[in-house]
Image: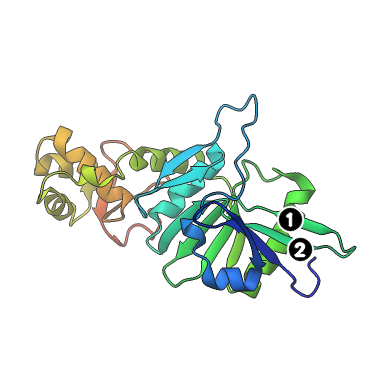
């Protein structure tokens, strides 16, 4: 573990120059959500999914993603109304272990919350990903985050159905899917009382025009459905905070 909380942060400034700073100072003053990755995501031969970019509906900008697991967790955080900023690998943490050797770790994901606090996270594809080194580094990074009032987590993979539903809705996250003026208000009104997806859609108009707006509203939380069950045309859709569903869209 770090000795005396002696953590250092390494990050790239807006012009791409590496900066090393005391962690407590950097956490207080640096807008990590605006920074480029401090080191590139590796491209691993043989993997079906390599490094890429995620367009964030929260920020209107791209976020670097290094794996399918990270891509999925970005979807979750991008829907969280308390998240105001996202970045991929924006900071490297340095510390000395008990033998005095310098150790380092670059968490995969950074999220800024509305209250100014933040989350550093890793996105393992399975519980044992990264081995003992990743677990040990996670414990140290968690300590560093606690010292500044932040949090660190290894984000567990999502259930396949939930991940598939989020991926589908994410395809409609862009503002263009809100469509013509007045359509969103009509969609929200159509589902003021819970009803099957297709019924509410057809009550508003042509499904070809209306469905993208409904999915956009579901992504942004203006409407709610059970995302832990497969989406289909008869799935029950209700208003924001419909009491039959919990705050994440799962059935109570």
Asked if marks 1 and 2 touch (Cβ < 8 Å), the reply is yes
Residue at the right extreme, as displayed:
99
The residue located at (55%, 62%) in the rendering is 119
Dot 2: element:
strand
Residue drawn at x 90%, y 63% is 99
Q: Position of residue 89 (x, y in %)?
A: 58, 51
Coloring scheme used: rainbow
Specify whether residue 229 is in view. Answer: no
Q: Which residue is mark 2?
A: 95
Quarter holding residue 2: bottom right
Residue 250 in the figure: left or right of residue 155: left
Decide: is 185 above or below 126. Answer: below
Q: Residue 106, can we see it? A: yes
Label 2: few (<14), some (14–19) or many (≥20) C-alpha neighbours in 10 Å: many
Which residue is label 1 attached to? 104
Residue nearest the observer in this picture, 25 or 180: 25
| Foreground residue among 31 and 183 | 31
The disc at residue 28 is none
């Amino acid at each position: 573990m770090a000795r005396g909380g002696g953590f250092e942060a390494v990050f790239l400034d807006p012009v791409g120059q590496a900066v090393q700073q005391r962690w407590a100072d950097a956490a207080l003053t640096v807008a990590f959500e605006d920074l480029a990755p401090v080191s590139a995501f590796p491209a691993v031969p043989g993997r079906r999914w390599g490094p890429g970019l995620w367009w964030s509906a929260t920020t209107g900008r791209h976020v670097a993603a290094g794996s399918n697991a990270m891509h999925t967790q970005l979807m979750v955080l991008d829907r969280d109304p308390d998240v105001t900023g996202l970045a991929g690998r924006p900071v490297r943490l340095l510390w000395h272990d008990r033998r005095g050797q310098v150790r380092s770790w670059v968490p995969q994901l950074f999220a800024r919350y509305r209250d100014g606090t933040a989350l550093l996270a890793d996105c393992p594809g399975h519980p044992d990903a990264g081995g003992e080194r990743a677990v040990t580094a996670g414990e140290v990074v968690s300590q560093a985050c606690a010292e500044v009032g932040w949090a660190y987590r290894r984000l567990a993979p999502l259930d396949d159905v939930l991940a598939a539903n989020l991926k589908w809705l994410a395809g409609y996250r862009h503002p263009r899917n809100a469509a013509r003026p007045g359509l969103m208000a009509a969609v929200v009104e159509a589902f003021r009382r819970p009803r099957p997806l297709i019924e509410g859609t057809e009550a508003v108009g042509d499904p070809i025009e209306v469905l993208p707006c409904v999915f956009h509203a579901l992504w942004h939380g203006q409407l709610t459905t059970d995302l832990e069950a497969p989406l289909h045309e008869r799935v029950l859709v209700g208003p924001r905070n419909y009491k039959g569903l919990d705050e994440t869209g799962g059935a109570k």
